[in-house]
Amino acid sequence: MKRSSRFRQFSLLWLAFLIAAAGLPAGQTAGAATTVPDGVYTVDYFYLIDGQNSVSVANNYLKEQGQ
């Protein structure tokens, strides 16, 4: 009975370690992204039909230049 209890404690400790290690970031973090210099850029966009990947008719009427 004592051996089973030790195995259970070891298993729980190992599981806790794995869960804690899974939460650590691996490699580069999001804060290390390169910055884009200030300026004016053009970005293409489309109005899509809700829940689909098809271009909406509203795409023809709602596009206007912004700043």
Image: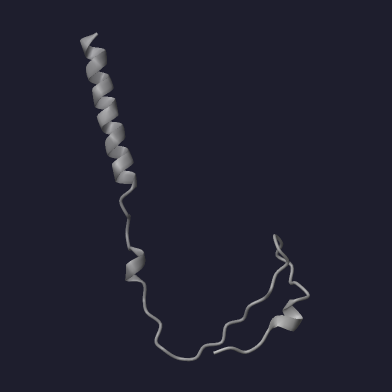
The residue under the point 75% across, 76% down is: 58
The residue under the point 45% across, 91% down is: 39
Q: Position of residue 15 (x, y in %)?
A: 31, 33
The residue under the point 36% across, 76% down is: 34
In the image as oriented, which residue stretches furthest toward the right?
Answer: 57
Count of labels in the image = 0
Q: Position of residue 59 (x, y in %)?
A: 73, 78
Q: Nearer the viewer, residue 10 or 58?
A: 58
**Is residue 28 shown above or below 19?**
below
Q: How is the image coloured?
A: one colour
In the image as oriented, which residue stretches furthest toward the top?
Answer: 1
- 54 relative position to 25: left or right: right
Q: Position of residue 16 (x, y in %)?
A: 29, 35
Quadrant where the C terminus is found in the figure: bottom right
- 60 relative position to 5: left or right: right
**Is residue 18 shown above or below 55?**
above
Q: Position of residue 64 (x, y in %)?
A: 66, 87
Examine the image and state in which quarter residue 30 appears. Answer: bottom left
Examine the image and state in which quarter residue 14 appears. Answer: top left
**Is residue 64 shown above or below 27?**
below
Quadrant where the N terminus is found in the figure: top left
Examine the image and state in which quarter residue 43 appears. Answer: bottom right
- 14 relative position to 35: left or right: left
